[in-house]
Image (cartoon, rainbow, N blue to C red):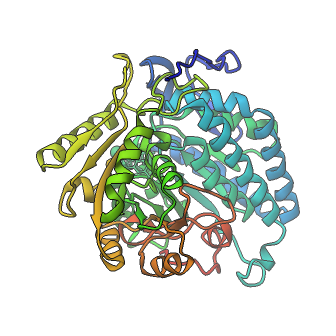
Amino acid sequence: MTFEYAPAPESRSIVSIKPKYGHFINGSFVAGKKHFPTINPATEEILSHIALGGASDVDKAVMAAQKAYTKTWSKLSGEERGKYLYRIARILQERAREFAVLETLDNGKPIRETRDIDIPLVAAHFFYHAGWADKLDYAGLGHNPKSYGVAGQIIPWNFPLLMLAWKVAPALATGNTVVLKPAETTSLTALLFAEVCQQAELPDGVVNIVTGDGSTGSAIVNHPGIHKIAFTGSTEVGKKIARAIASTDKKATLELGGKGANIVFDDAPVDETVEGIVNGIFFNQGHVCCAGSRLIVQESIAEEIIEKLKVRMAKIRVGDPLDKNTDLGAINSKEQLIKIKELSAIGDAEGAERWSPQCNLSNKGFWFAPTIFTGVTQANRIAQEEIFGPVLSVLTFRTPQEAMDKANNTPFGLSAGIWSEKGSRIFWASQHLKAGVIWANTFNKFDPASPFGGYKESGWGREGGKHGLAAYLKNGKETGAK
Ligand code: NAI
Ligand code: MG
């Protein structure tokens, strides 16, 4: 028997979106010159118009951040900075529903995720870093570690407010000031966060938000007043940033792409594993740098796992992101949908076998059904390149060593999941996997205390935990970063 769920939409009346936004510089909103629309990717409805920041806007923001750094923020004690961070964290909790609805409208991800994952993690990041602000002497980073000054932060669209929190919270806790640029398709929650900074009476200029596109981001990277860069996004842009700062003394952390694998051994608990694989790739439409976009399953159980996976995939509810029953929401942009379609077509052409459950996809907005490719080989592009969508590539293995070799055989090294009931096997595999984050019998679990980052083309440095603090401090021993 199958059940139909009645629609259970979350009301959008809690958010009030202005028709047009400027930049947030020195504690106030200032008008932009040019604007571009931001849309709801589930309906293509224009939500608002966002300012396209140019070099002069970036310059004003950096000047404000420098002034705030020298006059105010660097003079405050850690305890005082911590108070502001606690205040921001509490306001974020109080306004959680507003943020969740706004994020879902602008990004397309299900309300259940923004409400239960993104926004609670955002608040958790501010609480966690608030706690560190007055304890930096005890973080194992030497006595009285010093901040850099102004941090330039450029973030993507897949976890808009969470990536802001990953960047802003440690920067402020360690005594830096910030110029942040949200992604062009998802600026709204960053602009609402600017209101939270005002509400928290954060001193003017400590956080500045300049909206815009790649040219705006590039102006931040190249501004001489920026001392530290934190970027999350594509490997392509990460490489451009690395080149741009190579001859400067700017420090950087880069969180880039991934081609994560779930490695399933023959003793894995089947139902839990299937649930973990589904969560690993279909969570957030697969718009996750550490997504489990490859399944590497032991040959003897491959058939059983794939069969159960298909049964489970057929139950995924795709549709209105504001509906509380929805599992899989809209693809964030037309460009991203095109990329997913193109790479999937390449999978077909390479001879892999594609399967998706029957889904009624709306013809308004950007949608892609959950998809699995079997019969994938290591050389296939769908086994090597980041698709960044709800598409799983399945490979098989016979020996544990073969599983490790296959898992490591990509240009990336961000995440992996190991599924086995044997602790010794999990430890062995975790030592052989070249991945910054490894989960055992679970996937996509995040915690502010846990450092996050990758090997190889997945980036430089770590965010979160004590490692993440080090990345914002001059004498911090940052692992793997410039
Ligand atoms: P992107 O890397 O172009 O954009 C990320 C951020 O960088 C945005 O704020 C963008 O405005 C900014 N940016 C773009 N060009 C820049 C430049 N030259 N200098 C400084 N900042 C610049 O990513 P995009 O185009 O949105 O997505 C392309 C692919 O990247 C995706 O299909 C996915 O594979 C990957 N990606 C990975 C993410 C991750 O979490 N690691 C997040 C977003 C995308
Ligand atoms: Mg791009």
Residue at image point 61% right, 19% down:
18
Residue 235: image quadrant is bottom left
Percent position of residue 300, x then y: 32, 64
Q: Nearer the viewer, residue 140 or 247?
A: 140
Q: Nearer the viewer, residue 61 or 154?
A: 154
Q: Is residue 55 above or below residue 335?
A: below
Percent position of residue 266, x then y: 41, 67
Total marks in image: 0
Residue 74 visible (yes or no): yes
Residue 22 visible (yes or no): no
Residue 29: image quadrant is top right
Q: Nearer the viewer, residue 264 or 157?
A: 264
Q: Is residue 198 above or below residue 346?
A: above
Residue at image point 65% right, 32% down:
100
Q: With 382 as the anchor, is 430 left or right in this view?
A: right
Q: Is residue 163 above or below residue 411?
A: above
Question: Which residue occupies the extreme front position in the image?
Answer: 1
Q: With 412 as the anchor, is 176 left or right in this view?
A: right
Q: Is residue 124 above or below residue 211?
A: below
Percent position of residue 199, x then y: 80, 35
Percent position of residue 364, x then y: 37, 16
Residue at image point 84% right, 67% down:
134
